[in-house]
Amino acid sequence: MQIADRLTNIPPYLFMELRKKINKAKADGIDVISLAIGDPVEATPDSIIDELCARAKDPENHRYPIDEEKGMLAFRQEVARWYHSRYGVSLDPGSEVLGLIGSKEGCHHFVLARINPGDIVLMTDPGYPAYRASILMGGGEPYNVPILAENRYLPVFEDIPTDIAKKARGMFLNYPNNPTGACATRVFFDRLVDFARQFDIAVCYDNPYSEILFEGQERLSFLMAEGAKEVGIELNSLSKPFNMCGWRIGMAAGNPDLIAAVSKVKENSDSGIFNPIQYAGIHALKHEARFIEDMLSIYEKRREMVLKALGKIGIVFDAPKGTFYLWVPVPKGMTSLEFTNRLFDKAAVVVAAGTAYGQYGEGYIRISLTVPDNRLAEAMARIEREFA
């Protein structure tokens, strides 16, 4: 059976390939520790689970979701309140907020809502691989914009060729950044709005790590910038702040025309978010801010553990202040893949090679802090022994 041509240019999804590798090793009896996938191991707060269970017992919630593709109005209203309290951003729940089955869905639907076949879409390199897949499946042409350590992993808009910028119809950005952990600034947001206005580029600002910040880093939303709602939307998610990755609930907010367009794609793609999950999401946004702080304390301790262990084998670097990842330079004389393979083959520790996120990821690996403390400590001990 021949598959569609649109799939031939899309590489295998990184994390599916990693899972296959891990599962094979485990089947062979190897005690593998994976630091490659950003999936929190701590449980979703009990109060959120209790809300889900209570709502799931109501037969009314077994029907198609309320407001279907848009998300129930109560959820969108709570998102608007959360954005106002956390970021000082005002949103109209009716026209500027949309419920999503996770922010990853929003990325894909943004392409279908904005991009025509052959349109250029800008994305950072290194960058989240799913952006490229969505662009290609939507018929667009991805254009890599380097983000480098010397520029604090922020794109330099002046370095984007003018002829490319004129042809671009969209741009994916993600700060706090996966994979580098870098954070944006208010000044950067202003430059981004100016750039988008100049070339009529729609911004899809993917912000699911907005709450995962360290060392006094300012909590920011792209929508805080003056004019941001004129040029783009921001995606966010309950996955990372409330450990709800598998629940699949998030939101899009911003430009009402883009929100309406994404909503139109959704109404022809799915039937919305299960009502009890939306009620649980409302509860999370309203009552579980303290849980975020508790998780940050856990991630901070793990972060320091990893930095200390890496320092013992000569890997010392200035770690960015966002996400629960560390973007780690490889030892001198080794490539990303060589270092990754050595950790797997000699220490049974799985990390993500930087090149999985683009050519400018060469020279780095990504380590996730979303593993139990004892397993992380064991992984660090193995790495120390291998490189002692």
Image (cartoon, grey):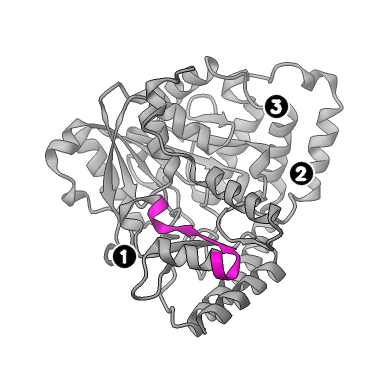
Q: Which residue is drawn at 36% across and 52% down?
A: 126
Mark 3 Cα-neighbour bin, 10 Å: few <14, some 14–19, many ≥20: many
- Write down the region rendered in magenta: 345-356
Q: How many callouts does the rendering have? A: 3
Q: How far apart are marks 3 and 1 (CA)?
A: 42 Å
- Amino acid type, mark 2: Ile
Q: Neighbour class for label 2 at 10 Å: few (<14), some, many (≥20)?
A: many
Q: Which of marks 2 and 3 is in front?
A: 3
Left or right relative to 115: residue 267: right
Q: Measuring from the top left, give residue 206's x and y in whole percent.
A: 45, 43
The numbered mark at residue 149 is 1
**What SS does tag 3 mark?**
loop
Separation (CA) of disc 2 from disc 3: 14 Å
Q: State the image coordinates of residue 64 (x, y, percent, origin top left).
A: 70, 16
Q: In this view, does 54 lie above or below 3?
A: below
Point out which mark residue 274 bears.
3
**Toward which corner of the image does residue 337 lie, by quadrant?**
bottom left
**Contact (Cβ within 8 Å) of mark 2 with mark 3:** no
Q: Name the residue under label 2.
A: 48
Q: In this view, does 309 lie to the left or right of 293?
A: left
Give the spatial CA distance, label 2 vs label 1: 39 Å
Please state which amino acid type lies under the numbered disc 3: Phe
User: In the displayed structure, would residue 165 be above or below residue 336?
Assistant: above
User: Mark 2 or mark 1: which comes first in sequence?
Assistant: 2
Q: Quadrant of residue 226?
A: top left
**What amino acid is labelled 1 in the image?**
Ala
| Badge 3 or badge 1: first in the primary sequence | 1
Q: Callout 2: helix, strand or loop? A: helix
Residue at 51 percent across and 58 percent down: it is: 323
Query: 36 or 263, which is in the foreground?
Result: 36
* Foreground: disc 3 or disc 1: 1
